[in-house]
Image: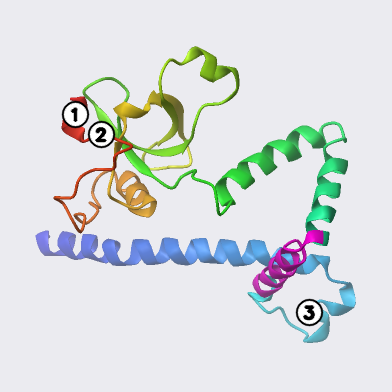
Amino acid sequence: MAALRRWLFAGLLVIAPLAITLWVLQWIVNTLDQTLLILPGAWQPEHLFGFRIPGLGVLLALAILLFVGAVTSNFIGRKIVAWGDAVLNRIPVVRSIYSSVKQVSDTLFSPSGNAFRTAVLVEWPRPGMWTIALITGSPGGDVVNHLPGDFVSVYVPTTPNPTGGYFVIVPRKDCVELRMSVDEALRYVISMGVVVPAAPAAPGAAPSPALPDPAAIR
């Protein structure tokens, strides 16, 4: 029985990640295949070839993204996008949804943005307890008028689902910058500490001057 139990868990360790990966990939392909619905009926794969071609929608979606990116990379394209933004921002209901989504997407996907680029260690949910967080930016608006000193905005992901979490504003001096990538930090959080990131290449290197050494805030 002990051997059977050991074999069962060994099989789960191999099959479970593979099955979940295949399931996620299938969901992504099936979702992107819906892009084919924008084609006229005569151009649908079922009409042209007589059968469905999985993944063709993925290629079409990539082609559309590349085309839109190429068009909007020049002066005229940017003017067209600005005009479209102005039109959408004047439509009730649509304006509130579109502006919020655009602000988030611009923050996350902008090449010059700093959101979700740095993993830090913060005391959460109380002093003496530590967790991993991601820097999302700096406080703005009227918030800065009520925060004395230098503060940063951080996102504290939950385990094992990092898409849920907490947005908190903490003093910069209370954040310890980690020498690990955001991907490594998220894997550490998702695995509940089981998947430990590799040691940094230069463990004796001095910490970033923007954030103090862990011992300095204890």
> In the structure shown, which secondary structural element does the residue marked by tag 2 occupy?
loop
On whether residue 105 falls in the magenta region, the answer is: no
Type of amino acid under label 3: Glu
Q: Residue at x 83, y 81 (%)?
A: 47
The residues bearing labels 2 and 3 have C-alpha atoms spaced at a distance of 61 Å
- Mark 3 or mark 2, which is nearer the start of the sequence? 3
Q: Which residue is mark 2?
A: 212
**Mark number displayed over residue 216:** 1
Q: Nearer the viewer, residue 76 or 116?
A: 76
Circle 3 is placed at which residue position? 46
Q: Position of residue 126 (x, y in %)?
A: 29, 20
Q: Is residue 123 visible?
A: no
- Counting every numbered tag in the picture gives 3
Q: Which residues are magenta?
A: 58-75
Q: Which residue type carries mark 1?
A: Ala
Element assignment for label 1: helix
Which of the 4 image quarters holds residue 21?
bottom left
